[in-house]
Image (cartoon, coloured by chain):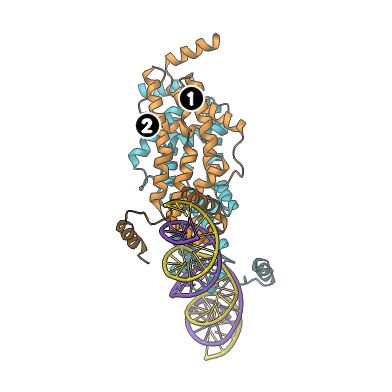
Chain colours: A orange, B cyan, C yellow, D purple
Amino acid sequence: MVETTGDSDLLDLRKGRPAAGQDPVKRAQIIEGARRVFIDKGFEAASMNDITREAGVSKGTIYVYFANKEELFEALIEEERGTIFKNMYDVLDHADDLRETLVKFGKVLVMKITSAKVIQAQRTVIGASDRIPELGARFYERGPKRGHDKFVVFLNAAIERGLLAIDDVDLAAYQFTDLCLAGLFRQCIFSYRSKAPTQAEIDHVVRSGVNVFIKAYGTATLAAEEQASTSA
Amino acid sequence: MVETTGDSDLLDLRKGRPAAGQDPVKRAQIIEGARRVFIDKGFEAASMNDITREAGVSKGTIYVYFANKEELFEALIEEERGTIFKNMYDVLDHADDLRETLVKFGKVLVMKITSAKVIQAQRTVIGASDRIPELGARFYERGPKRGHDKFVVFLNAAIERGLLAIDDVDLAAYQFTDLCLAGLFRQCIFSYRSKAPTQAEIDHVVRSGVNVFIKAYGTATLAAEEQASTSA
DNA sequence: AGCAAATCGAACCGCGTGGTTCGAAATATT
DNA sequence: AATATTTCGAACCACGCGGTTCGATTTGCT
Protein backbone atom coordinates (compact mmCIF):
# COMPACT_ATOMS: atom_id res chain seq x y z
CA MET A 1 0.00 0.00 0.00
CA VAL A 2 2.83 2.39 0.84
CA GLU A 3 5.19 3.44 -1.92
CA THR A 4 8.42 3.32 0.00
CA THR A 5 10.34 1.50 -2.70
CA GLY A 6 10.19 4.37 -5.14
CA ASP A 7 11.29 6.85 -2.50
CA SER A 8 14.32 4.88 -1.35
CA ASP A 9 15.33 4.34 -4.96
CA LEU A 10 15.37 8.06 -5.40
CA LEU A 11 17.45 8.39 -2.25
CA ASP A 12 19.88 5.79 -3.54
CA LEU A 13 20.32 7.75 -6.73
CA ARG A 14 20.69 11.01 -4.87
CA LYS A 15 24.07 9.92 -3.53
CA GLY A 16 26.67 7.44 -4.70
CA ARG A 17 26.59 5.78 -1.32
CA PRO A 18 24.03 2.97 -1.33
CA ALA A 19 21.98 3.82 1.74
CA ALA A 20 23.30 1.14 4.14
CA GLY A 21 23.14 -2.56 4.82
CA GLN A 22 26.29 -3.61 3.03
CA ASP A 23 27.88 -5.74 5.71
CA PRO A 24 27.88 -9.27 4.31
CA VAL A 25 28.22 -10.81 7.77
CA LYS A 26 25.14 -9.05 9.11
CA ARG A 27 23.34 -9.94 5.91
CA ALA A 28 24.23 -13.60 6.30
CA GLN A 29 23.11 -13.49 9.90
CA ILE A 30 19.72 -12.16 8.89
CA ILE A 31 19.33 -14.72 6.14
CA GLU A 32 20.30 -17.50 8.51
CA GLY A 33 17.51 -16.47 10.86
CA ALA A 34 15.14 -16.12 7.94
CA ARG A 35 16.06 -19.61 6.77
CA ARG A 36 15.10 -21.21 10.04
CA VAL A 37 11.78 -19.42 10.22
CA PHE A 38 10.73 -19.53 6.56
CA ILE A 39 11.69 -23.13 5.98
CA ASP A 40 9.76 -24.53 8.86
CA LYS A 41 6.74 -22.23 8.85
CA GLY A 42 6.35 -21.36 5.19
CA PHE A 43 6.24 -17.87 3.71
CA GLU A 44 2.82 -16.81 4.93
CA ALA A 45 3.01 -18.21 8.43
CA ALA A 46 6.44 -16.76 9.06
CA SER A 47 6.51 -13.40 10.76
CA MET A 48 9.16 -10.74 10.61
CA ASN A 49 9.22 -10.72 14.40
CA ASP A 50 10.05 -14.42 14.40
CA ILE A 51 12.95 -13.71 12.07
CA THR A 52 14.06 -10.79 14.19
CA ARG A 53 14.14 -13.08 17.21
CA GLU A 54 15.81 -15.98 15.40
CA ALA A 55 18.44 -13.86 13.70
CA GLY A 56 19.24 -11.86 16.80
CA VAL A 57 18.98 -8.70 14.76
CA SER A 58 16.68 -5.79 15.33
CA LYS A 59 13.73 -5.24 13.09
CA GLY A 60 15.00 -1.87 11.99
CA THR A 61 18.25 -3.39 10.82
CA ILE A 62 16.52 -6.06 8.77
CA TYR A 63 14.62 -3.38 6.96
CA VAL A 64 17.88 -1.67 6.17
CA TYR A 65 19.12 -4.77 4.39
CA PHE A 66 15.87 -5.89 2.81
CA ALA A 67 13.01 -3.72 1.63
CA ASN A 68 10.31 -6.13 2.74
CA LYS A 69 9.41 -9.66 3.64
CA GLU A 70 9.18 -10.84 0.07
CA GLU A 71 12.60 -9.50 -0.87
CA LEU A 72 14.16 -11.18 2.13
CA PHE A 73 12.47 -14.43 1.20
CA GLU A 74 13.74 -14.22 -2.36
CA ALA A 75 17.27 -13.57 -1.17
CA LEU A 76 17.05 -16.64 1.02
CA ILE A 77 15.76 -18.86 -1.78
CA GLU A 78 18.47 -17.58 -4.07
CA GLU A 79 21.06 -18.64 -1.52
CA GLU A 80 19.46 -22.01 -0.85
CA ARG A 81 19.35 -22.71 -4.55
CA GLY A 82 23.03 -21.97 -4.78
CA THR A 83 24.08 -24.32 -2.00
CA ILE A 84 21.75 -27.10 -3.13
CA PHE A 85 22.95 -27.30 -6.69
CA LYS A 86 26.59 -26.52 -6.02
CA ASN A 87 28.89 -29.29 -7.24
CA MET A 88 25.93 -31.47 -8.06
CA TYR A 89 27.06 -32.03 -11.61
CA ASP A 90 30.76 -32.47 -11.07
CA VAL A 91 30.57 -36.23 -11.61
CA LEU A 92 29.72 -35.57 -15.22
CA ASP A 93 33.14 -34.03 -15.84
CA HIS A 94 35.08 -37.18 -14.99
CA ALA A 95 35.26 -39.23 -18.17
CA ASP A 96 34.51 -42.53 -16.55
CA ASP A 97 32.77 -45.65 -17.70
CA LEU A 98 29.40 -44.45 -19.01
CA ARG A 99 27.20 -46.71 -16.93
CA GLU A 100 29.08 -45.97 -13.73
CA THR A 101 29.03 -42.26 -14.44
CA LEU A 102 25.28 -42.37 -14.89
CA VAL A 103 24.91 -44.32 -11.66
CA LYS A 104 27.09 -41.89 -9.73
CA PHE A 105 25.28 -38.91 -11.19
CA GLY A 106 21.89 -40.42 -10.46
CA LYS A 107 22.81 -41.16 -6.88
CA VAL A 108 24.07 -37.67 -6.16
CA LEU A 109 21.00 -36.21 -7.79
CA VAL A 110 18.50 -38.30 -5.87
CA MET A 111 20.35 -37.99 -2.59
CA LYS A 112 20.38 -34.21 -2.79
CA ILE A 113 16.89 -33.67 -4.10
CA THR A 114 15.21 -36.03 -1.66
CA SER A 115 17.15 -35.00 1.43
CA ALA A 116 14.91 -33.73 4.20
CA LYS A 117 16.41 -30.25 4.11
CA VAL A 118 16.05 -29.82 0.38
CA ILE A 119 12.55 -31.25 0.30
CA GLN A 120 11.51 -28.78 2.95
CA ALA A 121 13.03 -25.94 0.98
CA GLN A 122 11.30 -27.08 -2.18
CA ARG A 123 7.97 -27.26 -0.36
CA THR A 124 8.42 -23.71 0.76
CA VAL A 125 9.20 -22.57 -2.77
CA ILE A 126 6.31 -24.52 -4.27
CA GLY A 127 3.91 -23.17 -1.69
CA ALA A 128 5.03 -19.63 -2.39
CA SER A 129 4.96 -20.23 -6.15
CA ASP A 130 1.23 -19.94 -6.08
CA ARG A 131 1.42 -16.31 -5.05
CA ILE A 132 4.84 -15.45 -6.48
CA PRO A 133 5.20 -17.55 -9.63
CA GLU A 134 8.40 -15.80 -10.73
CA LEU A 135 10.09 -17.05 -7.59
CA GLY A 136 9.45 -20.68 -8.39
CA ALA A 137 10.32 -20.12 -12.02
CA ARG A 138 13.62 -18.48 -11.13
CA PHE A 139 14.44 -21.27 -8.69
CA TYR A 140 13.80 -23.90 -11.32
CA GLU A 141 15.60 -22.04 -14.05
CA ARG A 142 18.76 -21.36 -12.11
CA GLY A 143 18.67 -24.73 -10.35
CA PRO A 144 17.26 -27.86 -11.97
CA LYS A 145 17.19 -26.34 -15.45
CA ARG A 146 20.84 -25.37 -15.37
CA GLY A 147 21.78 -28.86 -14.27
CA HIS A 148 19.57 -30.34 -16.94
CA ASP A 149 21.44 -28.36 -19.56
CA LYS A 150 24.76 -29.66 -18.30
CA PHE A 151 23.45 -33.19 -18.47
CA VAL A 152 22.29 -32.64 -22.06
CA VAL A 153 25.83 -31.66 -22.98
CA PHE A 154 27.07 -34.83 -21.33
CA LEU A 155 24.59 -36.97 -23.23
CA ASN A 156 25.54 -35.35 -26.52
CA ALA A 157 29.15 -36.21 -25.84
CA ALA A 158 28.20 -39.83 -25.23
CA ILE A 159 26.22 -39.84 -28.46
CA GLU A 160 29.24 -38.50 -30.32
CA ARG A 161 31.31 -41.32 -28.84
CA GLY A 162 28.77 -43.70 -30.35
CA LEU A 163 27.66 -45.04 -26.98
CA LEU A 164 24.12 -43.75 -27.07
CA ALA A 165 21.55 -43.26 -29.81
CA ILE A 166 18.95 -40.65 -28.88
CA ASP A 167 16.59 -38.75 -31.10
CA ASP A 168 15.31 -36.22 -28.55
CA VAL A 169 18.23 -35.60 -26.20
CA ASP A 170 16.44 -32.97 -24.19
CA LEU A 171 13.59 -35.31 -23.44
CA ALA A 172 15.95 -38.21 -22.74
CA ALA A 173 17.73 -36.10 -20.14
CA TYR A 174 14.44 -35.49 -18.35
CA GLN A 175 13.60 -39.16 -18.65
CA PHE A 176 16.85 -40.15 -17.00
CA THR A 177 16.39 -37.76 -14.13
CA ASP A 178 12.87 -38.90 -13.50
CA LEU A 179 13.82 -42.56 -13.86
CA CYS A 180 16.30 -42.05 -11.07
CA LEU A 181 13.74 -40.29 -8.92
CA ALA A 182 11.04 -42.82 -9.83
CA GLY A 183 8.29 -42.30 -7.30
CA LEU A 184 10.63 -40.89 -4.68
CA PHE A 185 10.22 -37.19 -5.31
CA ARG A 186 6.44 -37.21 -5.23
CA GLN A 187 6.45 -39.40 -2.14
CA CYS A 188 8.81 -37.07 -0.34
CA ILE A 189 7.22 -33.82 -1.36
CA PHE A 190 3.78 -35.00 -0.24
CA SER A 191 5.16 -36.22 3.09
CA TYR A 192 4.09 -39.74 2.22
CA ARG A 193 7.57 -40.65 3.26
CA SER A 194 8.40 -39.13 6.58
CA LYS A 195 12.09 -39.79 6.05
CA ALA A 196 14.39 -39.44 3.07
CA PRO A 197 15.07 -42.65 1.13
CA THR A 198 17.90 -44.80 2.44
CA GLN A 199 21.14 -45.22 0.59
CA ALA A 200 20.11 -48.77 -0.32
CA GLU A 201 16.82 -47.61 -1.77
CA ILE A 202 18.55 -44.94 -3.79
CA ASP A 203 21.08 -47.47 -5.08
CA HIS A 204 18.35 -49.82 -6.15
CA VAL A 205 16.20 -47.22 -7.89
CA VAL A 206 19.12 -45.53 -9.62
CA ARG A 207 20.69 -48.77 -10.86
CA SER A 208 17.36 -49.89 -12.24
CA GLY A 209 16.83 -46.49 -13.82
CA VAL A 210 20.22 -46.64 -15.50
CA ASN A 211 19.41 -50.12 -16.77
CA VAL A 212 16.19 -48.92 -18.34
CA PHE A 213 17.91 -45.90 -19.83
CA ILE A 214 20.71 -47.90 -21.37
CA LYS A 215 18.38 -50.57 -22.69
CA ALA A 216 16.42 -47.84 -24.40
CA TYR A 217 19.24 -45.68 -25.68
CA GLY A 218 22.44 -47.76 -25.50
CA THR A 219 24.13 -48.70 -28.78
CA ALA A 220 25.78 -51.94 -29.85
CA THR A 221 29.11 -50.19 -29.33
CA LEU A 222 28.28 -49.57 -25.69
CA ALA A 223 27.12 -53.16 -25.24
CA ALA A 224 30.36 -54.43 -26.75
CA GLU A 225 32.44 -52.20 -24.48
CA GLU A 226 30.56 -53.38 -21.42
CA GLN A 227 30.92 -56.99 -22.52
CA ALA A 228 34.66 -56.48 -22.89
CA SER A 229 35.12 -54.87 -19.48
CA THR A 230 33.13 -57.54 -17.64
CA SER A 231 35.00 -60.41 -19.30
CA ALA A 232 38.34 -58.76 -18.61
CA MET B 1 -9.65 -27.28 21.35
CA VAL B 2 -13.40 -27.81 21.50
CA GLU B 3 -14.74 -31.34 21.34
CA THR B 4 -17.75 -30.67 19.16
CA THR B 5 -17.27 -33.80 17.10
CA GLY B 6 -17.80 -36.15 19.98
CA ASP B 7 -20.78 -34.20 21.27
CA SER B 8 -22.55 -34.06 17.93
CA ASP B 9 -21.95 -37.75 17.46
CA LEU B 10 -23.79 -38.35 20.70
CA LEU B 11 -26.56 -36.04 19.59
CA ASP B 12 -26.76 -37.88 16.31
CA LEU B 13 -27.44 -41.06 18.16
CA ARG B 14 -29.92 -39.46 20.52
CA LYS B 15 -32.41 -38.76 17.77
CA GLY B 16 -32.89 -39.90 14.23
CA ARG B 17 -32.54 -36.26 13.24
CA PRO B 18 -28.83 -35.41 12.92
CA ALA B 19 -27.93 -32.49 15.18
CA ALA B 20 -27.07 -29.86 12.60
CA GLY B 21 -24.87 -29.16 9.66
CA GLN B 22 -25.97 -32.17 7.74
CA ASP B 23 -27.36 -30.52 4.66
CA PRO B 24 -25.13 -31.75 1.86
CA VAL B 25 -26.07 -28.80 -0.34
CA LYS B 26 -25.01 -26.24 2.23
CA ARG B 27 -21.91 -28.26 2.89
CA ALA B 28 -21.04 -28.31 -0.78
CA GLN B 29 -21.65 -24.57 -0.96
CA ILE B 30 -19.22 -23.95 1.86
CA ILE B 31 -16.61 -26.22 0.35
CA GLU B 32 -17.00 -24.54 -3.01
CA GLY B 33 -16.24 -21.19 -1.42
CA ALA B 34 -13.38 -22.72 0.50
CA ARG B 35 -12.01 -24.15 -2.71
CA ARG B 36 -11.82 -20.79 -4.42
CA VAL B 37 -10.12 -19.14 -1.47
CA PHE B 38 -7.77 -21.93 -0.36
CA ILE B 39 -6.62 -22.87 -3.84
CA ASP B 40 -5.59 -19.42 -4.86
CA LYS B 41 -4.29 -18.08 -1.56
CA GLY B 42 -2.93 -21.17 0.14
CA PHE B 43 -3.86 -22.43 3.58
CA GLU B 44 -2.17 -19.79 5.70
CA ALA B 45 -3.10 -16.77 3.65
CA ALA B 46 -6.72 -17.78 3.35
CA SER B 47 -9.03 -16.35 5.97
CA MET B 48 -12.31 -17.70 7.22
CA ASN B 49 -13.85 -14.33 6.43
CA ASP B 50 -12.77 -14.69 2.81
CA ILE B 51 -14.46 -18.07 2.69
CA THR B 52 -17.55 -16.70 4.35
CA ARG B 53 -17.73 -14.03 1.68
CA GLU B 54 -16.96 -16.37 -1.20
CA ALA B 55 -19.34 -19.09 -0.10
CA GLY B 56 -22.16 -16.70 0.68
CA VAL B 57 -22.62 -18.42 4.01
CA SER B 58 -22.38 -16.88 7.42
CA LYS B 59 -19.45 -17.56 9.63
CA GLY B 60 -21.58 -19.14 12.28
CA THR B 61 -22.97 -21.66 9.83
CA ILE B 62 -19.54 -22.66 8.63
CA TYR B 63 -18.59 -23.45 12.19
CA VAL B 64 -21.64 -25.64 12.46
CA TYR B 65 -20.41 -27.76 9.57
CA PHE B 66 -16.69 -27.69 10.31
CA ALA B 67 -14.99 -27.47 13.65
CA ASN B 68 -12.20 -25.23 12.45
CA LYS B 69 -10.18 -23.99 9.52
CA GLU B 70 -8.00 -27.05 9.33
CA GLU B 71 -10.93 -29.45 9.25
CA LEU B 72 -12.57 -27.48 6.50
CA PHE B 73 -9.36 -27.52 4.53
CA GLU B 74 -9.01 -31.26 4.94
CA ALA B 75 -12.57 -31.82 3.78
CA LEU B 76 -11.83 -29.74 0.70
CA ILE B 77 -8.67 -31.64 -0.14
CA GLU B 78 -10.47 -34.91 0.35
CA GLU B 79 -13.04 -33.83 -2.20
CA GLU B 80 -10.48 -32.51 -4.65
CA ARG B 81 -8.57 -35.75 -4.44
CA GLY B 82 -11.73 -37.64 -5.26
CA THR B 83 -12.58 -35.65 -8.37
CA ILE B 84 -9.01 -35.59 -9.62
CA PHE B 85 -8.41 -39.31 -9.52
CA LYS B 86 -11.91 -40.39 -10.46
CA ASN B 87 -11.95 -42.53 -13.59
CA MET B 88 -8.27 -41.89 -14.14
CA TYR B 89 -7.46 -45.57 -14.34
CA ASP B 90 -10.40 -46.79 -16.36
CA VAL B 91 -8.29 -47.18 -19.50
CA LEU B 92 -6.46 -50.00 -17.79
CA ASP B 93 -9.60 -52.13 -17.72
CA HIS B 94 -10.02 -52.25 -21.47
CA ALA B 95 -7.94 -55.16 -22.68
CA ASP B 96 -6.46 -53.38 -25.64
CA ASP B 97 -3.19 -53.63 -27.44
CA LEU B 98 -0.56 -53.23 -24.70
CA ARG B 99 1.36 -50.38 -26.26
CA GLU B 100 -1.76 -48.40 -27.06
CA THR B 101 -3.15 -48.99 -23.59
CA LEU B 102 0.03 -47.67 -22.06
CA VAL B 103 -0.09 -44.63 -24.32
CA LYS B 104 -3.72 -43.92 -23.48
CA PHE B 105 -3.06 -44.37 -19.78
CA GLY B 106 -0.01 -42.16 -19.88
CA LYS B 107 -1.84 -39.41 -21.71
CA VAL B 108 -4.74 -39.36 -19.27
CA LEU B 109 -2.33 -39.38 -16.37
CA VAL B 110 -0.20 -36.52 -17.61
CA MET B 111 -3.12 -34.47 -18.79
CA LYS B 112 -4.82 -34.65 -15.41
CA ILE B 113 -1.78 -34.21 -13.23
CA THR B 114 -0.35 -31.27 -15.16
CA SER B 115 -3.63 -29.42 -15.69
CA ALA B 116 -3.59 -25.92 -14.24
CA LYS B 117 -6.32 -26.69 -11.74
CA VAL B 118 -4.73 -29.84 -10.42
CA ILE B 119 -1.28 -28.30 -10.24
CA GLN B 120 -2.67 -25.47 -8.18
CA ALA B 121 -4.38 -27.93 -5.87
CA GLN B 122 -1.21 -29.93 -5.49
CA ARG B 123 0.75 -26.79 -4.67
CA THR B 124 -1.69 -26.00 -1.94
CA VAL B 125 -1.39 -29.49 -0.49
CA ILE B 126 2.39 -29.48 -0.72
CA GLY B 127 2.61 -26.08 0.91
CA ALA B 128 0.39 -27.22 3.73
CA SER B 129 2.25 -30.53 4.03
CA ASP B 130 5.01 -28.73 5.80
CA ARG B 131 2.78 -27.94 8.74
CA ILE B 132 0.28 -30.76 8.39
CA PRO B 133 2.24 -33.75 7.05
CA GLU B 134 -0.63 -36.19 7.54
CA LEU B 135 -2.66 -34.19 5.07
CA GLY B 136 -0.17 -34.59 2.28
CA ALA B 137 0.36 -38.22 3.18
CA ARG B 138 -3.35 -38.95 3.09
CA PHE B 139 -3.70 -37.15 -0.23
CA TYR B 140 -0.90 -39.18 -1.75
CA GLU B 141 -2.07 -42.44 -0.25
CA ARG B 142 -5.67 -42.19 -1.36
CA GLY B 143 -4.76 -40.58 -4.70
CA PRO B 144 -1.53 -41.37 -6.54
CA LYS B 145 -0.77 -44.41 -4.41
CA ARG B 146 -4.11 -46.03 -5.06
CA GLY B 147 -3.70 -45.50 -8.78
CA HIS B 148 -0.18 -46.83 -8.62
CA ASP B 149 -1.50 -50.04 -7.08
CA LYS B 150 -4.03 -50.45 -9.86
CA PHE B 151 -1.29 -49.99 -12.41
CA VAL B 152 0.83 -52.62 -10.67
CA VAL B 153 -2.04 -55.06 -11.06
CA PHE B 154 -2.22 -54.20 -14.74
CA LEU B 155 1.50 -54.74 -15.21
CA ASN B 156 1.35 -58.10 -13.45
CA ALA B 157 -1.40 -59.17 -15.84
CA ALA B 158 0.78 -58.16 -18.79
CA ILE B 159 3.66 -60.13 -17.30
CA GLU B 160 1.44 -63.16 -16.96
CA ARG B 161 0.51 -62.82 -20.61
CA GLY B 162 4.21 -62.98 -21.37
CA LEU B 163 4.33 -59.48 -22.82
CA LEU B 164 6.57 -57.94 -20.21
CA ALA B 165 9.48 -59.17 -18.14
CA ILE B 166 9.95 -57.15 -14.94
CA ASP B 167 11.84 -58.03 -11.81
CA ASP B 168 10.63 -55.18 -9.60
CA VAL B 169 7.09 -54.43 -10.74
CA ASP B 170 6.46 -51.82 -8.09
CA LEU B 171 9.49 -49.84 -9.17
CA ALA B 172 8.66 -50.31 -12.85
CA ALA B 173 5.23 -48.81 -12.27
CA TYR B 174 6.80 -45.71 -10.78
CA GLN B 175 9.27 -45.60 -13.62
CA PHE B 176 6.51 -45.65 -16.19
CA THR B 177 4.59 -42.87 -14.48
CA ASP B 178 7.64 -40.69 -14.20
CA LEU B 179 8.72 -41.45 -17.75
CA CYS B 180 5.39 -40.12 -18.92
CA LEU B 181 5.72 -37.04 -16.77
CA ALA B 182 9.39 -36.61 -17.72
CA GLY B 183 10.28 -33.09 -16.67
CA LEU B 184 6.73 -31.84 -16.93
CA PHE B 185 5.58 -32.21 -13.35
CA ARG B 186 8.53 -30.40 -11.83
CA GLN B 187 8.28 -27.65 -14.44
CA CYS B 188 4.61 -27.15 -13.73
CA ILE B 189 4.77 -27.32 -9.98
CA PHE B 190 7.57 -24.74 -9.84
CA SER B 191 5.70 -22.42 -12.20
CA TYR B 192 8.52 -22.69 -14.69
CA ARG B 193 5.76 -23.38 -17.18
CA SER B 194 3.05 -20.82 -16.86
CA LYS B 195 0.68 -23.00 -18.84
CA ALA B 196 -0.08 -26.69 -18.85
CA PRO B 197 1.65 -28.73 -21.55
CA THR B 198 -0.11 -28.86 -24.90
CA GLN B 199 -1.70 -32.02 -26.19
CA ALA B 200 1.09 -32.35 -28.73
CA GLU B 201 3.76 -32.12 -26.04
CA ILE B 202 1.99 -34.71 -23.95
CA ASP B 203 1.69 -37.03 -26.96
CA HIS B 204 5.37 -36.74 -27.70
CA VAL B 205 6.56 -37.27 -24.15
CA VAL B 206 4.19 -40.16 -23.47
CA ARG B 207 4.95 -41.99 -26.71
CA SER B 208 8.65 -41.67 -26.05
CA GLY B 209 8.14 -42.81 -22.48
CA VAL B 210 6.24 -45.87 -23.64
CA ASN B 211 9.00 -46.65 -26.13
CA VAL B 212 11.62 -46.54 -23.41
CA PHE B 213 9.49 -48.64 -21.11
CA ILE B 214 8.84 -51.32 -23.71
CA LYS B 215 12.45 -51.42 -24.84
CA ALA B 216 13.43 -52.03 -21.26
CA TYR B 217 10.73 -54.46 -20.22
CA GLY B 218 9.09 -55.76 -23.40
CA THR B 219 9.55 -59.45 -24.22
CA ALA B 220 10.19 -61.16 -27.54
CA THR B 221 6.56 -62.23 -27.45
CA LEU B 222 5.43 -58.62 -27.36
CA ALA B 223 7.83 -57.69 -30.16
CA ALA B 224 6.48 -60.53 -32.29
CA GLU B 225 2.89 -59.47 -31.65
CA GLU B 226 3.66 -55.90 -32.57
CA GLN B 227 5.50 -57.04 -35.66
CA ALA B 228 2.51 -59.10 -36.69
CA SER B 229 0.00 -56.31 -36.19
CA THR B 230 2.01 -53.75 -38.14
CA SER B 231 2.60 -56.08 -41.08
CA ALA B 232 -1.08 -57.04 -41.10
C1' DA C 1 -51.00 -21.03 10.65
C1' DG C 2 -47.94 -22.58 14.02
C1' DC C 3 -43.75 -24.40 15.50
C1' DA C 4 -39.18 -26.00 15.68
C1' DA C 5 -34.83 -26.09 13.39
C1' DA C 6 -31.29 -23.91 10.81
C1' DT C 7 -29.12 -19.86 9.30
C1' DC C 8 -27.77 -15.29 9.52
C1' DG C 9 -25.03 -11.35 10.80
C1' DA C 10 -22.91 -8.64 13.79
C1' DA C 11 -20.24 -8.04 17.60
C1' DC C 12 -16.52 -9.33 20.69
C1' DC C 13 -12.09 -11.37 22.19
C1' DG C 14 -6.99 -11.05 22.58
C1' DC C 15 -3.43 -11.11 19.69
C1' DG C 16 -0.19 -10.69 16.03
C1' DT C 17 0.53 -8.76 11.37
C1' DG C 18 3.96 -6.02 8.01
C1' DG C 19 5.68 -1.81 7.78
C1' DT C 20 7.72 2.38 9.53
C1' DT C 21 9.86 5.73 12.57
C1' DC C 22 13.24 7.68 15.67
C1' DG C 23 16.14 8.76 19.46
C1' DA C 24 19.51 6.30 22.12
C1' DA C 25 23.36 3.29 22.26
C1' DA C 26 27.16 0.97 20.26
C1' DT C 27 30.67 0.54 16.92
C1' DA C 28 34.31 2.02 13.50
C1' DT C 29 37.07 5.25 11.55
C1' DT C 30 40.10 9.05 11.57
C1' DA D 1 39.35 11.59 21.82
C1' DA D 2 36.20 13.20 18.49
C1' DT D 3 33.40 12.05 14.80
C1' DA D 4 30.56 9.53 11.56
C1' DT D 5 28.05 5.43 10.78
C1' DT D 6 25.23 1.39 12.18
C1' DT D 7 22.56 -0.95 14.95
C1' DC D 8 19.32 -1.39 18.46
C1' DG D 9 14.83 -1.65 20.55
C1' DA D 10 10.68 -0.02 21.48
C1' DA D 11 6.78 2.08 20.12
C1' DC D 12 3.18 3.07 16.78
C1' DC D 13 -0.01 2.37 12.94
C1' DA D 14 -4.33 0.45 11.04
C1' DC D 15 -5.86 -3.82 10.29
C1' DG D 16 -7.22 -8.55 10.02
C1' DC D 17 -6.81 -12.85 12.21
C1' DG D 18 -9.38 -17.44 14.05
C1' DG D 19 -12.59 -18.43 17.06
C1' DT D 20 -16.85 -17.92 19.53
C1' DT D 21 -21.30 -16.29 21.05
C1' DC D 22 -26.12 -15.12 20.70
C1' DG D 23 -30.37 -12.98 19.62
C1' DA D 24 -32.97 -12.09 15.46
C1' DT D 25 -34.53 -13.90 11.22
C1' DT D 26 -35.60 -17.12 7.88
C1' DT D 27 -36.76 -21.64 6.45
C1' DG D 28 -39.17 -26.00 6.11
C1' DC D 29 -42.30 -29.21 7.88
C1' DT D 30 -46.77 -30.60 9.80
User: Mark 2–mark 1 contact, CB under 8 Å?
Assistant: no
Query: Residue A119 placed where, x, y %?
Result: 53, 44
Determine which of the numbered discs, if any, sits on residue A170 in the image. Answer: 2
Residue closest to the eye, C12 or B193: C12
* SS at mark 2 in the image: helix
Query: If the image is split into quadrants, where does the C terminus of chain B sit?
Result: top left
Confirm whether residue A56 shows in the render: yes
Q: Is residue A83 left or right of residue B71?
A: left
Chain designation of label 1: B
Query: Residue B203 placed where, x, y %?
Result: 36, 37
Whole-number angstrom distance, CA of label 2 to CA of label 1: 20 Å
Residue closest to the eye, B16 or A90: A90
Task: Write down the quadrant of residue A4 in the picture.
Answer: bottom left
Classed neighbour count for the residue bearing mark 2: other residues with Cα under 10 Å, few (<14), some (14–19), many (≥20):
some
Query: If the image is split into quadrants, where does the N terminus of chain B sit?
Result: bottom right
The amino acid on which the numbered mark 1 sits, given as a three-letter code, is Ala
Classed neighbour count for the residue bearing mark 1: other residues with Cα under 10 Å, few (<14), some (14–19), many (≥20):
many
The amino acid on which the numbered mark 2 sits, given as a three-letter code, is Asp
Q: How many marks?
A: 2
Q: Is residue A47 left or right of residue B6?
A: left
* SS at mark 1 in the image: helix
Confirm whether residue A165 shows in the render: no
Q: Which residue is mark 1?
A: B216
Q: Is residue C16 left or right of residue B113?
A: right
Q: Is residue A152 above or below residue B34?
A: above
Chain designation of label 2: A
